[in-house]
Amino acid sequence: MQQKHTQLARLLEIMERLRDPETGCPWDIKQTFETIAPYTIEEAYEVSEAIASGDRDKICNELGDLLLQVVFYAQMATEEDSFTFEDVAKQVSDKMVRRHPHVFGSLPAIDEQLVKQNWEAIKKAERADASNGQTASILDDITSTLPAMVRATKLQKRAASVGFDWPDMKAVIKKMYEELDELDQVLTDTPQDKERLQDEIGDILFVASNLARKAGLDPETALLGCNRKFERRFHYIEERLNNQNCRLEDASLEQMEALWKEAKKSYFSGK
């Protein structure tokens, strides 16, 4: 435990020195909350990618980069006397204790489903407290800057928690067909209307997110897996064409489609 505290103290000290207006790093000194925010998002995605790779050393390294972001914000806040790293740690610690009364309080041990229900009930009470007497929405604290697919899932889960949900996956699939028909109608009637096309395609993506949720899956993870699959198969096309001394730009769609099918067979055969 002492070693953990020592390394954390060392990291905080390093950031303080980097931000020293006289002897620190010019780049670090000029940063603000706003300029660092994009890096934080990037680091979070890099942690996700490392987890997908299964490489524990890489995960450890990326988590360090993400922790550095928290330390960076805390140092800037300390300089403006708004909050400190200790305040950040205290707030999240208090929240974890408050939201786990079955561990830190007097509630008896409960199963996972009841834990989730209790967690949402506590969050609802917290939202009510934060509303200062104004009417609070159950959607209020879902961050608007989340990636669209991630936010769609959170919105759907929150609405489902009060009963606003499809009864089963078949109902969602039926809705998907309805949305596809609506898109087809727009393409037939007003194919140049980009606003309507965007709206209908957005509806399809939203329903796709719902479909993944009803299947007990995370749509973002599903799409990431699909992206990796596409990359793997497209790399196969590139390699095969290269072996045939054929440039990618010179290959016909039929050639690439045939190689795509080869890539699928090669993957499923374990080659």
Image (tube, grey):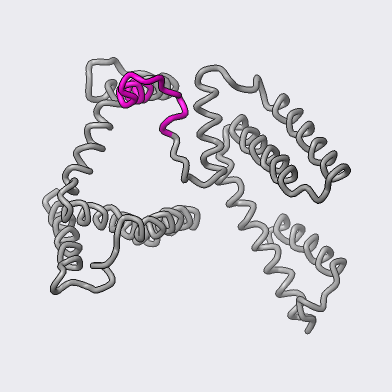
90 to the left or right of 218: left
Q: Position of residue 62 (x, y in %)?
A: 37, 59
Residue 72 drawn at (x, y percent) = 25, 58
Q: In which quarter of the image is residue 134?
A: top left
Q: Would you say residue 4 is visible in this rendering?
A: no
Name the residue at the bottom extreme: 245
In the displayed structure, 52 sits above or below 104; it is below
Task: Kindly identify the residue that appears in the image at 14 percent across and 52 percent down.
Answer: 5
Tell me residue 124's x, y (percent). Answer: 38, 22
Report the residue at 82% width, 63% height from top: 257
Q: Position of residue 22 (x, y in %)?
A: 13, 73
| The quarter of the displayed image where residue 125 is located | top left
- Which quarter of the rendering shows the C terminus? bottom right
All told, the count of numbered labels is 0
Please give the name of the residue rendered at 28% of the width and 58% of the height, measured from the top-left corner: 68
Along the line of sight, the residue nearer the viewer: 207 or 31: 31
Classify residue 47 by image quadrant.
bottom left
Is residue 75 in the magenta section?
no
In percent of the image, x 57 and y 43: which residue is there? Answer: 149
**In this picture, which residue range is highlighted in magenta?**
122-141
Q: Do we see residue 79 in this rendering?
A: yes
Foreground: 252 or 188? 188
Residue 143 placement, left or right of 132: right
In the image, is residue 25 above or below residue 116? below
